[in-house]
Image: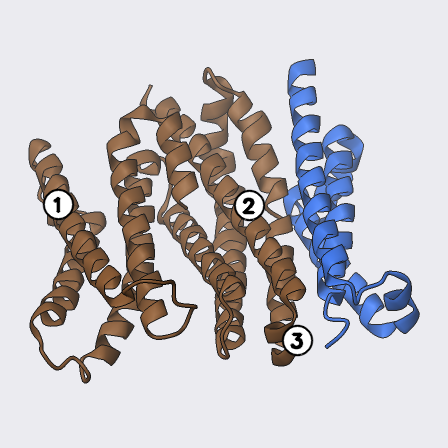
Chain colours: A blue, B brown
Amino acid sequence: MKESATFIASAAITIFFTGCIVIAHDASTDFKQSLAAFTGHHWISVSVITIVLFMLFLGLLLGSKNARKSLRVYDIKLWSTALIVVTLLMMLGILAELVARYLAD
Amino acid sequence: MLLAIGGIALVYERWVGHALIAIIGLVLMIYVLTTGAMLKGRIKRSSGNVFKLHKRGGIYFGAFILGSFGYGLWIRLQHGESILSSIHGKLGLIILLIVVLQLIPSLFLKNRTRYRRLHKIVGYALAPILVIDASWGLHDGVIAGTKSDLVLLHSISGGLAALALVWILLEMLHPTDRSLARARIASYFAAFLVTAGCWIAGGYNYLTVYGSQVKPVILTGPHPWVHEIVMEAKEHIFVFLPIIAFALSITLSVLDRDVFLSDAKYRRALAMIACLALFMVLLMFLMGAIISDTGKTGMEV
């Protein structure tokens, strides 16, 4: 299957958006409270959002040939590198945000 | 797993002896398994007499398991406890018996043809048992006393997921005709363990036990940063892991066998993703040990 990097691409995009949500919810108390109000706990909300985003991007990429073509999902090397870079950047971003907040407090 | 155990040992000096034993045991096990897989043609043979290396590795591994069991027995006797009173000790005894059953017939049977299949199955079965025992030892040494059995299930799942990811890595690096089928099985295991054992069981523990019992102890203790930074980072960074495990698993399940065998670039890309997932599992292991030890120390004060 030439475009089996679709799943890797979906994971990379999902992790990027989830990472942004996590950083935003750590930075903004209001956003964190709204996430907590959504399911009862902010962590459950983030988990649910992650699953929904993954399914959404997967559906989008599997359903649209144009999206696959424009995102070059046939290129496994590109998307595996993107997944690694995005994951590591988001990890560092989350960690930096938490350290900054701890030091500020 | 070896890196995680080494890291934990560096953080907690009192755990250095146990960590060294776990690391050496796991390294020897990997060596024996790898040479065994080379003998069966599962992975590419290296030069030299592989059978001799496998036999020698097996003997060293057996001797080491016997020695570490004796060391465990000695430690337990020093504390006035029976070695079989703990699950770690019982598993240690099971491992010792399996190793003896693997070694003795191999050394003394002249015609090993009929015994080979059993030897192979028991050999592979030994790997998860040893990982479970090492995780249990980790639990006893660092975590015990602070949490429920759910944490034990959580850490064992992490250890086995790490093993499954190493398995995927080996299949990617040394491809044979049946490598893809085996890598698929390993990836299903990894996805299941990460989801059920790490995400659901760990999440349930985090939402119930951790928040009410451990978190207040850490926040009022001398190291509140362990919750504020390490735990907060762990709970959110972890969420990426099941997505990576699922993406890897689905990619392997739809991958064409010919592409897998002929395209080294593809295999390298998948190996890199398996490495990323493995790194994250080990990081979670290390973070979990730091959190549990801080909680345990806080509760003891």
Front residue (pair B280, A94): B280
**Residue A103 position (above or below residue B37):** above
What residue is pinned by disc 3? B259
Instruction: Specify the farthest residue to the front.
Output: B48
Q: Name the residue type under label 2.
A: Met
Disc 2: host chain: B
Q: Nearer the viewer, mark 3 or mark 1?
A: 3
Identified at 54% across, 28% down, the residue is B227
Indicate which disc, 3 or 1, sits on the residue closer to the N terminus. 1
**Residue B140 position (above or below residue B190):** above
Front residue (pair B208, A82): A82
Occupied quadrant, residue A85: top right
Identified at 71% across, 39% down, the residue is A90
Occupied quadrant, residue B44: bottom left
Which label number is shown at residue B280?
A: 2
Residue A52 appearing in the image: no
Front residue (pair B95, B115): B115
Query: Could you say where residue B248 lies in the image, as x and y percent from the top left?
Result: 62, 63
What residue is pinned by disc 1? B67
Indicate which disc, 3 or 2, sits on the residue closer to the N terminus. 3
Q: Name the residue type under label 3.
A: Val
Answer yes or no: do the residues labelled 2 and 1 have beta carbons within 8 Å? no
Q: Nearer the viewer, mark 2 or mark 1?
A: 1
> In the image, are marks 2 and 1 on the same chain?
yes
Q: CA distance from mark 3 to mark 1?
A: 46 Å
Q: Nearer the viewer, mark 3 or mark 2?
A: 3
**Element carrying mark 1:** helix
Q: CA distance from mark 3 to mark 2?
A: 28 Å
Disc 3: host chain: B
The 10 Å Cα crowd at callout 3, few under 14, some 14 to 19, many 20 or more, is some
